[in-house]
Amino acid sequence: MAFSTEEIERYARHIVLHDVGGPGQQKLKAAHVLVVGAGGLGAPVLLYLAAAGVGRIVLVEDDVVSLSNLQRQVIHGTPDIGRPKVDSARDAIAALNPHVELVTHRTRLTAENALDLIGGVDVVVDGSDNFSTRYLVSDACVLARKTLVTAALGTLDATITTVRAHERGPDGTPNPTYRCLFPEPPPPGTVAPCAEAGVLGALAGTAGSIAALEAIRAIVGFGEGLVGRLLMIDARSMRFETLSYGWDPENPLTGETVRITDLSAHAKAA
């Protein structure tokens, strides 16, 4: 997959970078990445994946742009208010990097479409803003044997981790699933949405950029990454900490007694 003269200049800072180089940039060009959501987290993910030269980005998003989004959802602008987010994201990516193909699905990720959408990509980045989608995406990635980078925002805090549950660690133990870290979502109503509690806009950019970095790292294949580690960002005290977690033999997806073999429970929940 040869680069054009324009692509060589565009990606020059990657190509001369030891850990990426020409072979790594070729991997990025050949990669297919699914991004769930074009909101506060998904916006910087989309921009940085496109800037990095990921060849095909698939976006799943059903919302339209509102004025209150613009404090953090940097892929959209004031003229986009009222437009579908998939359309404004497409325009922004085309302006940023015409060598990237963006495939859009103006819909929600559901139990019915998740495996079809996830099955056709190499890496999934989840920037959704609700627990039901987050658990649906994580379960589907385990079933489809796909790498997942998942990020979540609080008011002044954020978390990012990478799940490669289809692989094993150096000691032969299965890599953990998202449910090894958080077995069940919190009860409804216990976590206020950002419309009620608020969210620091620049924090979404920080967490989304790190999620994009994790996806790029997974594609190119350098560094340690966040498999089995939860990165926690505290914007109030400006602290970055990591929590290590491992495979739970009681988890219902890859544990000693497998209880989740499809997404039917998510369909019932919806």
Image (cartoon, grey):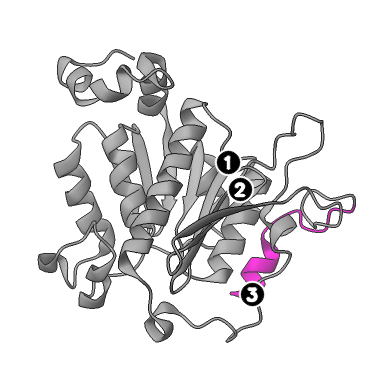
Disc 1 marks which residue? 147
- Tell me if 73 is positioned left or right of 98 in this view: right
Q: Secondary structure at mark 3?
A: helix
Magenta-highlighted residues: 257-270
> Residue 135 placed where, x, y %?
61, 62
- For badge 3, the amino acid type reads Ala
Circle 2 Cα neighbour tier, 10 Å, few/some/many (<14 / 14–19 / ≥20)? many
Labels 2 and 1: the sequence-earlier one: 2
Is mark 3 in CB contact (under 8 Å) with mark 2?
no
Closer mark to the observer between disc 2 and disc 1: 1
> Residue 197 placed where, x, y %?
42, 83
- Tell me if 145 is positioned left or right of 53 in this view: right
Q: Measuring 70% from the left and 67% from the top, which residue is drawn there?
A: 265
- For badge 2, the amino acid type reads Cys
> Residue 38 placed where, x, y %?
34, 59
- For badge 1, the amino acid type reads Thr
| Alpha carbons under labels 3 and 1: distance apart | 24 Å
